Amino acid sequence: LKQRAPDSFEVMVVERDPKYTRSSTVLSVGGIRQQFSLPENIQLSMYSADFLRNIKQHLSVLDDDPPDIQFQPHGYLFLATEDGAEQMLKNYNVQKELGAKVELLQPYQLKEKFPWMSTEGIALGSYGFENEGWFDPWALLNAFKKKACSLGAEYVNGEVIGFEFRNEHPIVDPTLDPLLRTNYMYIKDDEGEVHCVEFAFLIIAGGPFSSEVAKLLHIGTGPGMLSVPLPVEPRKRYVYVFNCETGPGIDMPLVIDPSGVYVRREGLGGKYICGRSPSETEEPDVSNLEVDYNFFDSSVWPVIAKRIPHFECIKVSSAWAGYYDYNTFDQNAIVGRHPYFPNVYLATGFSGHGIQMAPAVGRAMMELLIDKTYVTIDLTKFHFHRVFQDQPVYEQHIV
């Protein structure tokens, strides 16, 4: 917004966690991939990959060192059993049509390319050999913030605690029930003082806690189009760190087993990270960020030890937990204008893909506010209307 129309907008970012101690971005593994099944998700990540490739051009600040997000372009490798091979082929065809750099590998080709990996039970692999890998999410977050501040954006340490509403009668038919409208929100600062702030547009981008802000707008508790809640909630995910001096080297991509277990190396010192999204019945308590090490022993280690025999004798050296902004409706992003409020927009529910899609989604929000339509990538499919109409849009490649 500040780049496109620097004098037309005053941009305020309200952040209740200014040190980002519970930030989904900072606590993520910083991955980026184009291997999705939905065209929109592929396009979002392809745009972001190009943005990150040219990050010094986009996010450099005068008289400051250019940003270095330490991008590691070593790719993603998805593995499929016989049952999953057909879906993988469908995904591949969509990805190739959109220009993604991916290749399908038969078991013997996987063994040739990655001799450290067992291909037992694997029928097909999909390898993203360009524009996929991982980066330092903290460095990217700081680069975004520093650039925004240099352009005049204001970051406020506080929490949105309410809105001031007014009733407005529809112009087309004044006899209809009045509509709720708002241009004022209340923010409690870090010293407990409450401030009233006027806004023209509001973008709810609160990650896993976005629904808390939505409820303050009566989304989910009101009548009609306000009766449907924003289906986004925190889901805790664990990331485990282990050492293996004899493990795969620099040629190792981020490997996703058919079970959903993933593993990649971290640096060059024999360190690796791994994890797995739990099943619905295994979902952990989200009231804290404590790590369940038993989950590694029962649900992660047996899989990676079988897939990569070098990992048979490993032990966890450390671990952390973070939150997905999990869309319980269909695990896809919810973006665009809310169907009830003409000046309230949503950018949430990415279910683990937010950091890699952030540059593209930021541009999409800018286009909606200034151009009143999507210009770069059409994200209409991800609007809130689908929730209201109970029409989920599912992504087949969720990790």
Image (tube, rainbow, N blue to C red):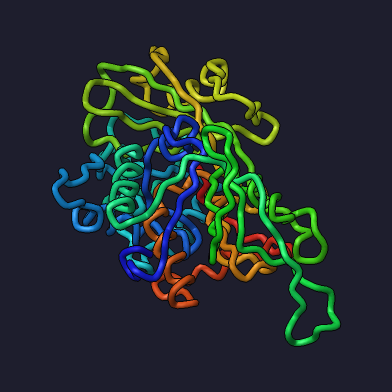
Q: Position of residue 151 (x, y in %)?
A: 29, 57
Left or right of 246 in this view: 215? right
Against 137, residue 369 (above or below) is: below
Comparing 100 with 183, the one in front is 183
Against 105, residue 378 (above or below) is: below
Q: Quadrant of residue 10?
A: bottom left
Is residue 109 at least partly visible in the picture?
no
Q: How many marks?
A: 0
> Which residue is most to the bottom?
172
Left or right of 31 in this view: 399? right
Q: Position of residue 391 (x, y in %)?
A: 69, 64
Q: Position of residue 194 (x, y in %)?
A: 60, 42
In which quadrant is the N terminus drawn? bottom left
Q: Quadrant of residue 382?
A: bottom right
Comparing 112 with 348, the one in front is 348
Residue visible at 58% across and 34% down in the picture: 192
Left or right of 127 in this view: 393? right
Residue visible at 44% across and 36% down in the picture: 18
Q: Position of residue 236 (x, y in %)?
A: 57, 32
Residue visible at 34% across and 25% down in the picture: 272
Comparing 155 with 209, the one in front is 155
Against 15, residue 302 (above or below) is: above
Is residue 8 at least partly visible in the picture?
yes
Residue visible at 40% across and 31% down in the picture: 263
Left or right of 209 in this view: 281? right
